[in-house]
Image (tube, rainbow, N blue to C red):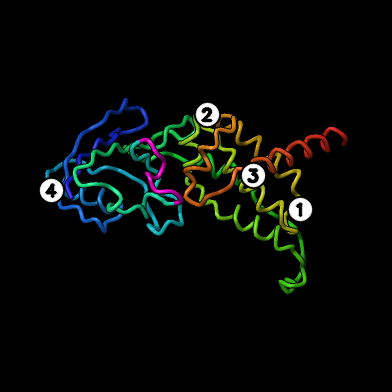
Amino acid sequence: MKLKLKVWRQKNAGDKGRFENYSIDEVSADMSFLEMLDLVNEQLLAQGKDAIAFDHDCREGICGACSLMINGIAHGPEAATTACQLHMRHFEDGSELCIEPWRAAAFPIVKDLVTDRSAFDRIIQAGGFISTNTGGAQDANNVLVSKTDSDKAMDAAACIGCGACVAACKNASAMLFVSAKVAHLALLPQGKLERSQRVLAMVGQMEREGFGGCTNTLECEAVCPKSISVTNIAMLNREFIKAALLTEES
C-alpha cells in the first residue's frame, strides 16, 4: 500500500505547531496503525530527521495510550477499536490520512501527537477509590451482587481512560470517563459507603481541570473503543444530585 500522510508536528507545548506531509509505501495491509507510524519513523530517522512522537504502550487495546485523531475521528473509522488495534486493511491503497493529537484545553500537547492526560489521573485520585476496612477477606460468594448490577459495573469498569470521549466532544467534556469511574464503584457493595463523597470530589476535580459540560450529543459513546454507554452519565447525574442534597441537609 501507498499512503499520503498529513501529520501534526509540534516541538513542545510552547510551539505553534503545523502539519507536515509524508508519503509512505510498502505498507502491509496486516500492519496496525501504530506499526505504520513506526515505518514512517524508520524512514524519517534514516533521513536524519526527527521521528514523530506518539503515545503507545501495550498495543493490545488495553492501556488507552494510543490517542490519535485519524481523519477527524478519535481512534479512526472502526467502531470499538483503539488506534493500536486498527489495521491498515481498513484503508484503501493511495488513501490520504490526517493524523492529529487530542484537541482539548485539559489535554495540552506535549510534543507532536503526544498529549498530557494527567487530568484524568487527578480525577481518579480525587475519589476513584474505596477505603472500607473489611478485616479479613471474605469468600467472594459471601457478598451478594445482582447479575444486573455486576454486569453494569463490569461494563463501566472497561473504560481504559484513553480520552477519546473528550477529543470527540464539541465541549471537550469528560463526563463519560468520570461517569464510568463513578458508576462501576457505586454499583458494587464495596463502593457504596463513599459514593456521595466520591461523586462530589470527582465532579469537582473534573470542573477544576477545565473540561466542558455535557450537552448529550452522544459522540463520546460513538467513538469509545470500549463502547461505554452514556447511561452511565445519567447515573452520574443522579448520584451527584443525591449527594448534593445530602450535603445540604447535613
Residue under the image location 74 percent in, 47 percent down: 195
Q: Give left or right: position of 230 versus 44.
A: right
> Which residue is the site of mark 4?
46
Image quarter for residue 146? bottom right
Q: What amino acid is at disc 2?
A: Asn
What's the distance in space between the residues labelled 4 and 2, CA to CA? 41 Å
What's the distance in space between the residues labelled 1 and 3, CA to CA? 19 Å
- Stretch of the chain drawn in magenta: 72-80
Tell me, yes or no, whether the highlighted magenta stretch contains residue 78: yes
Q: Are marks 1 and 4 in contact (CB under 8 Å)?
A: no
> Which residue is the site of mark 2?
171
Residue under the image location 64 percent in, 45 percent down: 232
Quarter of the image that includes the C terminus:
top right
Q: Main secondary structure of the magenta part?
A: loop
- Mark 2 burial class by Cα count in 10 Å: few <14, some 14-19, many 20+: some
Closer to viewer: mark 3 or mark 4: 3
What's the distance in space between the residues labelled 3 and 4, CA to CA? 49 Å
In terms of secondary structure, where does tag 4 sit? helix
Q: Are marks 1 and 3 in contact (CB under 8 Å)?
A: no
> Which residue is the site of mark 3?
231
Q: What amino acid is at disc 1?
A: Lys
Where is 63 relative to 8, above or below? below
